[in-house]
Amino acid sequence: MKKLAVAVMILVGFLSRTQAQQDPQFTQFFYNKLIMNPAYAGSKDLLCFTGLFRSQWVGLEGAPSSFLFSGDAPIRLAGQNFGVGLTALGDFIGYEENYSFRLAANWRSPQMIGPGYLRAGLDLGVTSKGIKNTNWIYPTGIPEPSIQSLNNNTNMVMEAGVGVYYYGSNFYAGVSALHLAGMRFADINIAQARHLFAMGGYTFEEPFHPDWDFNPNVLIKTDFAAATFDVNVNAIWRKFVWGGLTYRLEDAIAINIGADLGFIRPSLRSLQIGYSYDINTSRLSSYNSGSHEISLRYCIDLKPVKDIIPGYSVRFTDTRDPVKPVFK
């Protein structure tokens, strides 16, 4: 039954959605802004490296799995502030293998605009899509020629995206558009759909108790054929440990936990780890036991330390003022 379910899922995907390419989803999108918005690069005023791995719909044969690596940093040229970043992505579902590599660059406003800074950026890169080692299971028992012709084909297309990102000491908001070239993977008859993302978050610092902050986040995404959204709320204890819930429309409810490891050992204060578990709420819930996602981030302060300070937490929400470290 599980094989039949995934076979139907893949066949429907190729036959009825050949004009769309849905990006992989990550529950911890608050850890993962660069892949959706090139204007995010450098906004933490730190050199940061992020890695994520997602295993979706565990127990369903051929279910999606994805990995991501990204790095970003601020730079200063000709008296102006810029940000640069790179992203490498792998996404696998059934017999489909997707790889993407993108470079991002942005410009930051010289002065604060209202309570925050504005960044505007673009990214360029390549994406490859391939159909590998296929052994199709046809529900009708009769091979479909249009599906058989896809076997062992790989295509590569150019990528381009733009975005704006506005952020301050306790908030962020961004809008971006990706896959603007809208190119077609000719040999497998799939067109790259353009995607639009809107995101935002706010940290309520110590609203009820000095040890606790609350951080809601929202992500809206569409390929102009369908739209969905993620809503997340995290409670943060002493700037080091957090936990919360995420809801994804008609798909999942997720539990998120994470920590800045400086809570365990001061020398590890630049290393953060996060985990989420999705409980599937769609019609595929009977065929899987949920989704797992693990994230790691490591950040380095590029500016020389002028004063001896107790140290600060590089908070996962990315909403701290980049020029004002959070003191313990």
Image (spheres, rainbow, N blue to C red):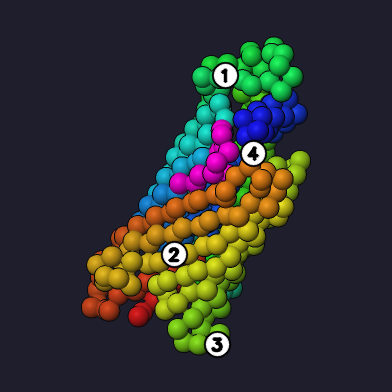
For residue 280, say whether it is visible.
Answer: yes
The residue that disc 3 covers is: 208
Label pair 2/4, CB-CB below 8 angstroms: no
Looking at the rendered structure, the kind of residue marked 4 is Gln
Q: CA distance from mark 2 to mark 3?
A: 21 Å
Numbered-mark total: 4
In the picture provided, is 46 more to the left or to the right than 118? left
Pick the quarter of the image with the N terminus: top right
The residue that disc 4 covers is: 22
Q: CA distance from mark 4 to mark 3?
A: 40 Å
Dominant SS of magenta comes to loop
The residue that disc 1 covers is: 135
Residue 301, horizontal then vertical, whole percent: 31, 63
Residue found 55% across the figure and 41% down from its top = 59
Looking at the rendered structure, the kind of residue marked 2 is Gly
Magenta residues, as a range? 53-64
Q: CA distance from mark 1 to mark 4?
A: 23 Å
Which-is-in-front pick, marks 2 and 1? 1
Residue 117, horizontal then vertical, whole percent: 53, 66
Label pair 1/4, CB-CB below 8 angstroms: no
The residue that disc 2 covers is: 258
Tell me the element at label 1.
loop
User: Is residue 11 or residue 165 the one in the foreground?
Assistant: 11
User: Is residue 244 or residue 38 the one in the foreground?
Assistant: 244
Q: CA distance from mark 2 to mark 4?
A: 27 Å
Q: CA distance from mark 2 to mark 1?
A: 40 Å
Q: CA distance from mark 3 to mark 1?
A: 57 Å
Residue found 40% across the figure and 66% down from its top = 259
